[in-house]
Image (cartoon, rainbow, N blue to C red):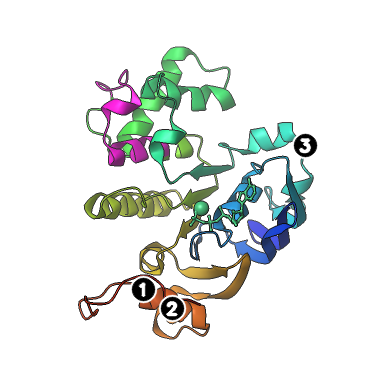
Amino acid sequence: MGALLDVRNLGVRFGAAEAVRGVNLSLDEGEVLGLVGESGSGKSVTSLAIMGLLPPAARVRGQILWQNAAPADPVDLLQQPPAAMRLMRGHKVAMVFQEPMTALNPVMSVGRQVAECVTAHHPSLTAREAKQRAIAALEEVALPQAALRYGDYPHQFSGGQRQRILIAMALINRPRLLIADEPTTALDVTVQAQILALLAALQREHSLAMLFISHDLAVVSQVAGRVAVMLAGEIVETGRADRLLLAPRHDYTRKLLAAVPTLRSDRSQPLAIAGR
Ligand SMILES: Nc1ncnc2c1ncn2[C@@H]1O[C@H](COP(=O)(O)OP(=O)(O)OP(=O)(O)O)[C@@H](O)[C@H]1O
Ligand SMILES: [Mg+2]
């Protein structure tokens, strides 16, 4: 059986600018692949292409093959009509974004937003059933007092709690692939660790395939078995996370690693990745 997701020679341009060039990625059922690279390297554009959420101005080449239930042939997501992609999103492939506040509707209670994710894909459910499922999903991500806080609005939750709510929304329809695009970047370090642990636990429990995106190789290597390193729109190195950490082959991967602070880091020096 082929990979669940097989991205072949993906290219994305915005006018004359090439945001992504010749990207190849594949993910098996239940596998976690990390995607790391500095700001602007094309990580989000790659994930939006998979979700079918690129703006109309984007010019896309290549194939994004998705393995439907075997033995069907894979379908190319880039060739799917918008209506089919809408059905895929949330149901088969879901995404968690960097900034939870902007991904939530500020004027709708979080409970209703989670319930709407259910009814979007299961319109025959009654409002009560959808609410029950929403509460169960919020409990699964360990949102404190999920049932009591069902009617609260996004601004009444902390950043970490909002990210938990988004994870609940992403997973409520049991997708096979979750794309987590810098899900912990906006959070402080302690909360970051909690959200990482939660994602890792849910991934294992549901045998979920996950594309985990971050600019931080150390964070990625905590959850991903395999890591792809992106630079200026291209993948420059792919390998097992532990091998990449111990023996990075590409100069840029070494620089990404050197930017990770350790107890032995020279604190008198800036942390930024020194020029490529
Ligand atoms: N809608 C758009 N129109 C034009 N250019 C875009 C658009 N979206 C992204 N780009 C460009 O594509 C390139 C890759 O952007 P992308 O958002 O994928 O980077 P990233 O690796 O996710 O960075 P970050 O770590 O900051 O999130 C950048 O040069 C960006 O300016
Ligand atoms: Mg991004």
Q: Which residue is mark 1?
A: 259
In the image, 180 versus 233, the foreground residue is 233
Residue type pointed to by label 2: Lys
Near mark 1 (Cα within 10 A), the count class, few <14, some 14-19 or many ≥20, is: some
Whether tag 1 and tag 2 are in contact, CB under 8 A, the answer is: yes
Q: Residue at x 37, y 35 (%)?
A: 165
Residue at position x 79%, y 45% in the image: 79
Residue underneath mark 3: 81
Q: Is residue 93 magenta?
A: no
Q: Nearer the viewer, mark 1 or mark 3?
A: 1
- The residue beneath circle 2 is 255
The answer to whether mark 1 and mark 3 are in CB contact below 8 A is: no
**Mark 1 → mark 2, Cα distance in angstroms:** 6 Å
Q: Which mark is residue 35?
A: none
Q: Is residue 244 visible?
A: no
Q: Amino acid at mark 1?
A: Ala
Which of pointers 3 and 2 indicates the residue nearer the eye? 2
How many numbered discs, if any? 3
The residue sitting at 47% across, 53% down in the picture is: 207
- Work out how far the residue at label 3 is from the one at label 2, CA to CA, in angstroms: 41 Å
Q: Position of residue 95 (x, y in %)?
A: 51, 44
**Secondary structure category for the residue under label 3:** loop
In the image: residue 103, left or right of residue 88: left
**Ligand 1 is within 8 Å of the C-beta of the residue at disc 1:** no
Q: What span is in magenta?
A: 147-166
Who comes first in sequence, dot 3 or dot 2?
A: 3
- Judged from the image, the secondary structure of the residue bearing numbered disc 2 is helix
Q: Quadrant of residue 197?
A: bottom left
Question: Is label 1 in a helix, a strand or a loop?
Answer: loop
Q: Is the residue marked by circle 2 packed among few (<14), some (14-19), or many (20+) residues within 10 Å?
A: some
